Image (cartoon, rainbow, N blue to C red):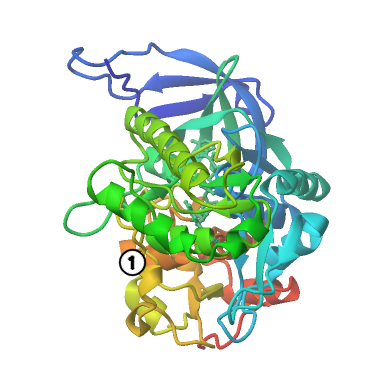
């Protein structure tokens, strides 16, 4: 049985700032009772309110909250998981790329996070021809993110999920959150959806796209994991075994007796583990990240896959006999779900042709990197084709318009749920790119509130000038 509760109207009790309660009532009760539960009108307490309410504490939301607060807005950040960072911490996705293969073109908040990261962040000197790539310790970065938001004065609520968007007279008034003590409301003047899945914007009624043209399938997901107990000297002493074990994995998989794996990555992990503890990005699954039961099943499947790899390696691969899983993602790594339609939509041409935009808020450079929606683990990154990547030394602009929409002016979307095609997202989904969006929109929200206008009406030149002052790399903006 499903629970349906749409089109609520929020009215503030007493109508004043700081009012303690709000009332929700169904504007249109469902006609049919079959398959739904009707919730009667009831009082929903107001938990908190702020100028800017950021929903989702992944890299995009962190950047948005931090930058809005830095420019004087009173900011609340809402996060469903116990800690901040989203995929970066809870799915162990721990690499930030900032270079167009010739120079660093992403700076600003990303660089601040790198600098604040201290011993938890390290430059990957070996990363071929992309010197400004950093790897970080996901556990340590949880602490760094907490400190950054605390210092910026952001009020953070973890452990609650944004579940309903209250819209009236064309503006979003509040987001309802589910907490351990019941449903509550958080009121704001601007709402930034950084949930990755576009939950808040979709709930507010903004249209969205899902998956690729044709079959609507989204990019494959990955369970990241880390191993300890590897003996690098033993691996080096048996150079022929990596190929033998890799071939065995392929043979068993093709016979249906071993799970799928990302081939390129698996081979390299077997051949050249750089350190005694290594992060593995090779365990694919495919499905709908918005389906709770399906996601539960896929997560369990992925955890089994990880142990299938490790058990085989312990048995077959010199240097791996004492390997143990040190850590697995708390959550599956999700690359794609809803893409909320915005004023501008980033597409493949804009990426590959390194298109510059008048409303640029920063640069992006990653290639169109699509992990097979069927879950084979294959990624177009392996192909390294000129037609799927901007030229080395060039980059495209990330436009503000991909985060704004033409229906609800006080709602913006940042991160992987911003407006793009399936192919455009395959580039702009990078955490560094998501943080560019977060910084641009967070700054815009605060400045626009200060100026008494909506974000889309704020003078883009003033925003760009402020972003540059805040360290954002922003070049070649067309007049
Ligand atoms: C396996 C894998 C490898 C990758 N490799 C790289 C890489 O090497 N480098 C790179 O830069 N990028 C990489 N990416 C892409 C990148 O990690 C993501 O695209 C990026 O983290 C998206 O950031 P985000 O802030 O938009 O979303 P997320 O990181 O998904 O954060 C969204 C946050 O919102 C919270 N949330 C969701 N719904 C709600 C709700 N209703 N209420 C409250 N909170 C909510 C979530 O708990 C989460 O904390 C990889 C992705 C995967 C899956």
Identify the residue at image location x=69%, y=74%: 125
Specify few, some or many for label 1: CA neighbours under 10 Å numbering under 14, 14-19, or 20 or more.
many
Identify the residue at image location x=39%, y=77%: 384
Q: Nearer the viewer, residue 198 or 306?
A: 306
Identify the residue at image location x=44%, y=57%: 418
Q: Is residue 137 above or below residue 331?
A: below
Q: Is residue 238 left or right of residue 349?
A: right
* Residue that label 1 marks: 423
Q: Is residue 329 left or right of residue 111?
A: left
Q: Nearer the viewer, residue 340 or 140?
A: 140
Q: Is residue 100 above or below residue 18?
A: below
Q: Is residue 341 visible?
A: no
Q: Is residue 21 above or below residue 327?
A: above
Q: How many marks?
A: 1
Quadrant where the image shows the N terminus: top left
Q: Is mark 1 within 8 Å of ligand 1?
A: no
Q: Is residue 282 visible?
A: yes
**Residue 82: which quarter of the image?**
top right
Q: Nearer the viewer, residue 454 or 269?
A: 269
Q: Nearer the viewer, residue 169 or 81?
A: 81
Q: Helix, strand or loop at disc 1?
A: helix
- Indicate the position of residue 354 as horizontal and vertical percent values: 44, 83
- Indicate the position of residue 401 as horizontal and vertical percent values: 45, 66
Identify the residue at image location x=34%, y=71%: 347
Q: Is residue 264 left or right of residue 117?
A: left
- Indicate the position of residue 294 as horizontal and vertical percent values: 32, 32
- Indicate the position of residue 340 as horizontal and vertical percent values: 38, 53
């Amino acid at each position: 049985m499903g629970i349906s509760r749409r089109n609520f109207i929020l009215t503030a009790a007493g109508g004043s700032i700081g009012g303690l309660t709000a009332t929700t009532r169904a504007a249109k009760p469902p006609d049919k009772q079959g398959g739904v539960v009707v919730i009667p009108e009831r009082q929903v307490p107001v938990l908190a309110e702020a100028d800017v309410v950021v929903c989702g504490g992944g890299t995009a939301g962190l950047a948005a909250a931090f930058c809005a607060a830095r420019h004087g807005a009173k900011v609340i950040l809402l996060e469903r998981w116990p800690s901040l960072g989203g995929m970066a911490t809870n799915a162990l996705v721990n690499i930030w790329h900032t270079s167009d293969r010739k120079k660093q073109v992403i700076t600003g908040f990303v660089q601040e996070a790198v600098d604040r990261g201290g011993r938890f962040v390290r430059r990957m000197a070996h990363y071929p021809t992309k010197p400004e790539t950093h790897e970080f310790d996901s556990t340590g970065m949880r602490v760094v993110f907490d400190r950054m938001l605390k210092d910026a004065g952001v009020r953070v609520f973890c452990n609650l999920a944004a579940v309903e968007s209250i819209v009236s007279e064309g503006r979003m008034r509040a987001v309802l959150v589910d907490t351990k003590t019941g449903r509550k409301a958080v009121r704001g003047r601007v709402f930034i959806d950084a949930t990755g899945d576009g939950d808040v914007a979709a709930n507010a009624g903004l249209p969205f796209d899902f998956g690729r043209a044709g079959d609507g399938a989204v990019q494959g997901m990955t369970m990241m994991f880390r191993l300890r107990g590897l003996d690098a000297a033993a691996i080096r002493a048996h150079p022929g075994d990596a190929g033998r074990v890799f071939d065995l994995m392929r043979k068993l998989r093709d016979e249906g007796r071993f799970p799928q794996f990302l081939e390129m990555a698996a081979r390299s992990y077997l051949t050249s583990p750089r350190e005694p503890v290594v992060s593995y990005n090779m365990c694919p699954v495919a499905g709908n990240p918005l389906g709770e039961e399906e996601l539960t099943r896929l997560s369990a499947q992925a955890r089994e896959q990880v142990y299938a790899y490790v058990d085989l390696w312990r048995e077959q691969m010199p240097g791996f006999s004492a390997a143990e899983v040190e850590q697995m993602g708390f959550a599956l790594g999700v690359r794609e779900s809803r893409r909320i339609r915005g004023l501008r939509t980033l597409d493949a041409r804009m990426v590959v042709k390194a298109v510059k935009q008048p409303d640029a808020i920063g640069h992006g450079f990653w290639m169109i990197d699509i992990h097979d929606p069927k879950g084979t683990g294959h990624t177009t990154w392996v192909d390294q084709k000129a037609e799927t990547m901007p030229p080395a030394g060039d980059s495209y602009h990330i436009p503000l318009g991909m985060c704004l929409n033409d229906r609800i002016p006080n709602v913006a979307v940042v991160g992987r749920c911003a407006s793009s095609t399936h192919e455009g997202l395959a580039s702009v989904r990078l955490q560094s790119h998501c943080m560019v969006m977060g910084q641009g929109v967070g700054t815009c929200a605060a400045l626009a509130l200060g100026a008494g206008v909506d974000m889309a009406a704020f003078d883009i030149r003033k925003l760009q000038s402020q972003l540059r002052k805040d360290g954002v790399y922003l070049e070649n903006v067309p007049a």
